[in-house]
Amino acid sequence: MKTLGCVLIAAVCMTAGPALAGKKKDEAAAAADARGCVANYKQEGSFMSGRTFSTWDVVPGVSLSTAFKRIYTEGVKSGLKVSSSDEKMGSIVFEQANAGTTFGAQNMVSLPWNVFIEPEGKNVKVSVTKTTPASLSSTKEFQIKSMCAVIDAARNK
């Protein structure tokens, strides 16, 4: 019986070990990425009810007009469609066409990306919010990477 217990413990450690090591590795990578857009990332909702992903960061030394033009340009170049925009208000609504299908659906869905740019002294604060419908699969890593890319587009090159 004692041997069986040791074998079970060893099996659990061998099975869970790599998963736990991967988790620590992911946490270490996130901690190493000190960008504000990573630290400010939030996810609300659930796979079953739909989710909202959001983040923001302050971009130093860039005007609202410059940030708006850079984000607008990079969004279009990356294949996003501009649904609406208002430079004075600092608002851009992108649409990610054919972003995937929801569980059991036959048609592709499009996803809105709401970008809001507001002055903050000699800097701008860029906020990005994305919403997915119920049962659309997406990873946290993809959401962080894509939303941080929007914010990074506003930075000095």
Image (cartoon, rainbow, N blue to C red):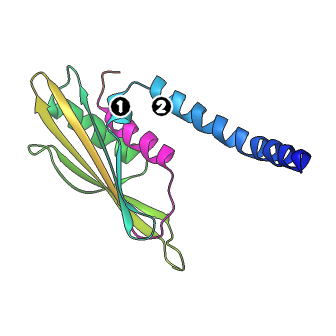
Characterize the magenta stretch by its predominant secondary structure.
helix
**On the rendered image, what quadrant is the C terminus found in?**
top left
Q: Which residue is mark 2?
A: 30
Write down the residue under mark 1.
Answer: 152
Residue 10 falls left or right of residue 58:
right
Between the residue at mark 2 and the residue at mark 1, the CA separation in whole angstroms equals 17 Å
Q: Nearer the viewer, residue 111 or 140?
A: 140
Q: Look at label 2 and name its amino acid.
A: Ala
The location of residue 18, given as percent across then percent down, is 72, 39
Task: Using residue 89 as the reference point, say whether residue 15 is left or right of it.
Answer: right
Q: Badge 2, how many Cα within 10 Å: few under 14, some, many 20+? A: some
- Residue at the spot x=20%, y=30% of the render? 66
- Could you say where residue 109 lies in the image, as x and y percent from the top left? 43, 69
Secondary structure of residue under mark 1? helix
Of labels 2 and 1, earlier in sequence is 2
Check disc 2 and report its element: helix, strand or loop: helix
- The answer to if 150 sits in the magenta stretch is yes
